[in-house]
Image (tube, helix red, strand yellow):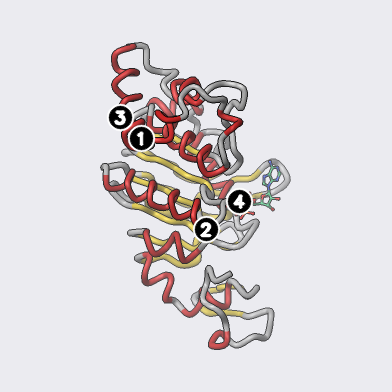
């Protein structure tokens, strides 16, 4: 459904993505993991139209979105929840959620979708009249998810949605992602908690230094011994692990362990 082929991109000071090949299948929950600075958020900026490939193919449902604007991308059914929090703290929860439907002119459709997202995220209905800024971090994430669903997206892209949340709040966020997936949305998730993300994913992707280094089912990627070395500061090169720490892979804690 979403295809990257030979994608190079950066911010003007050289390429950050250096030949990304990746397919996000329709109906999948694809989870991208990788060390800080690997280029995960940069990849997500391409999918939201905030950044464009310098070289390479980027297609959604067979059509190029390489030069599409964020608005055109939302219209085609892709929505993104960014890495940084981005609710309007002074607006109410309801106002924030309804802003998600800015491209929908039919008030009846907006009302119906609002009722649907309240069912999926009860916090939205419960705190509808409260200032968004008065909610906890985890609750604000739910409101961001609800706002994203107001566009009725085919593909939901999420950049580190559990960041900064305590384990219980993070678990609720993971459950919500699984619920969105079960409800028929395709999901592209970037997650720093490797275990939590890959356990739930149908497809796992490991990025390092601007490229995809490992791929497979979530469970296979999680079980791959190369993962341990990568998260101890090693690198994956041409299918082999080059550890820069000198720590043997066998002695490592599993990825995602605190
Ligand atoms: N707006 C920008 N301008 C210039 N360089 C940037 C910009 N945003 C990111 N970079 C650089 O691109 C590289 C990759 O950053 P990116 O945010 O994609 O990594 P990431 O994999 O999402 O990391 P993290 O796990 O820390 O979120 C980094 O070296 C970063 O400094
Ligand atoms: Mg990032």
> Residue at point 55% right, 79% down?
253
The residue most toward the front is 126
In percent of width and height, residue 95 lies at 49, 20
Are the residues tagged 1 and 3 within 8 Å (C-beta)?
A: no
Residue beneath the point at 54% across and 71% down: 257
Query: Mark 4 touching mark 2, by CB under 8 A?
Result: no
Badge 2 density bin: few <14, some 14–19, many ≥20, Cα 10 Å: few
Counting residues from the N terminus, which is met first, the one under dot 1 or under dot 4? 1
Q: Residue at x 50, y 36 (%)?
A: 48
Label drawn at residue 167: 2
Residue picked out by circle 4:
164
Along the viewing direction, whichever of 166 and 241 lies nearer the viewer: 166
> In terms of secondary structure, where does tag 3 sit?
helix
Disc 2 is placed on an element classified as helix
**Residue 222 visible to the viewer:** yes
The answer for how far apart the CA atoms under marks 4 and 2 are is: 9 Å
| Some atom of ligand 1 lies within 8 Å of the CB belonging to the residue at label 2 | no
Dot 3: within a 10 Å radius of its alpha carbon, few (fewer than 14), some, or many (20 or more) residues?
some
Q: Which mark is residue 127?
A: none
Quadrant for residue 243, please give it.
bottom right
Dot 2 or dot 1: first in sequence order is 1
Whether 60 is drawn above or below 230: the answer is above
Q: Residues within 10 Å of mark 4 (few under 14, many from 20)?
A: few
Q: Is mark 3 within 8 Å of ligand 2?
A: no
Nearer the observer: mark 1 or 4; the answer is 4
Q: Nearer the viewer, mark 1 or mark 3?
A: 3
The percent position of residue 49, horizontal first and vertical second, equals: 52, 33
Residue bearing the label numbered 1: 63
């Amino acid at each position: 459904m979403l295809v990257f082929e030979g994608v190079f991109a950066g911010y003007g000071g050289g390429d950050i993505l250096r030949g990304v090949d990746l397919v996000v299948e329709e109906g999948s929950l694809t989870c991208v993991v990788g060390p800080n600075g690997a280029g995960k958020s940069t990849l997500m900026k391409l999918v939201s139209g905030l950044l464009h490939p310098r070289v390479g193919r980027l297609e959604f449902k067979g059509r190029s979105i390489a030069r599409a604007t964020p608005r055109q991308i939302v219209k085609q059914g892709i929505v993104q929840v960014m890495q940084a929090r981005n609710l309007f703290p002074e607006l109410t929860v309801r106002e924030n959620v309804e802003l998600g439907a800015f491209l929908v002119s039919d008030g009846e459709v907006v009302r119906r979708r609002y009722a649907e997202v309240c069912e999926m995220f009860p916090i939205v209905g419960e705190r509808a009249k409260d200032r968004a800024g008065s909610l906890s971090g985890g609750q604000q994430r739910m409101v961001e998810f609800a706002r994203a669903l107001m566009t009725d997206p085919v593909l939901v892209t999420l950049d580190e949605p559990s960041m900064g949340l305590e384990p219980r709040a993070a678990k609720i966020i993971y459950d919500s992602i699984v619920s969105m997936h079960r409800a028929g949305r395709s999901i592209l998730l970037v997650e720093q908690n490797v275990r939590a993300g890959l356990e739930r994913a149908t497809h796992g992707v490991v990025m390092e230094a601007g490229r995809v280094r490992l791929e497979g089912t979530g469970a296979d990627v999680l079980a791959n011994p190369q993962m341990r070395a990568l998260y101890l500061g090693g690198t994956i090169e041409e299918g082999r692990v080059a550890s820069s720490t000198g720590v043997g892979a066998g002695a490592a804690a599993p990825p995602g362990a605190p």
